[in-house]
Amino acid sequence: KDKSITLRELNEAIQPRSGVSDQQVLHPSGFEEPAPQARSTSGLDIVAGTAVRGGNSDDVDQPVKITRGKDKPKPGGKRKRKCPQCHQFGSENTMYACGGQGGGAKRCDYFDVIGVRRCYKCFKKRESGESTHDPYTCPSAASTAL
């Protein structure tokens, strides 16, 4: 069958049948007239058909700006974080600058978990297979003053 013939048949099928009366659509009634006191425009400006408050700024309440109070500092101040490995194995110079501040014992830049000096960068590269350099013989681990 030709597509245009099929389309014409479908259109004829959905067309209203002759003889069926169209129902009339009822429109809603309009708004009621407002009360006379509501229609009074004294003291109001009309902008684009809408009544807005006039220019008398004494009647307008100014908004109150609400602000936060001051933050209270903690009684002891902010606690400095320190590396537990450097603290345990006696390195006062590196304790607050070490990468192990909250990163766990394995993250210490200067000591392993048993307290032997090592280079963290070489340790991670050797662990991931990027390098075969020994982290315990690295010059940066030996030269850092404690």
Image (cartoon, rainbow, N blue to C red):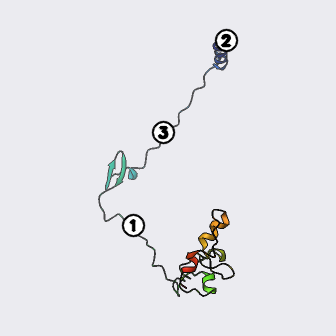
Q: Residue at x 40, y 69 (%)?
A: 65
Q: CA distance from mark 3 to mark 2?
A: 52 Å
Give whichever of discs 3 and 2 has the lower sequence position: 2
Give whichever of discs 1 and 2 has the lower sequence position: 2
**Depth check, front residue: 57 or 115:** 115
**Depth check, front residue: 44 or 31:** 44
Residue type pointed to by label 2:
Asp
* Marks 1 & 2, CB-CB < 8 Å contact: no
Q: Provide residue 68's location: percent of width, then percent of height.
A: 46, 74
Q: Provide residue 56's location: percent of width, then percent of height.
A: 29, 61
Mark carried by residue 29: none
**Depth check, front residue: 107 or 16:** 107
Quadrant for the C terminus in the image: bottom right
Q: CA distance from mark 1 to mark 2?
A: 73 Å
Mark carried by residue 30: 3
**Depth check, front residue: 25 or 48:** 48
Secondary element at image label 2: loop
Write down the residue under mark 2: 2
Say few, some or many: other residues with alpha carbon within 10 Å of mark 3 (under 14 / 14 to 19 / 20 or more).
few
Q: Horizontally, is 26 left or right of 67 in the view?
A: right
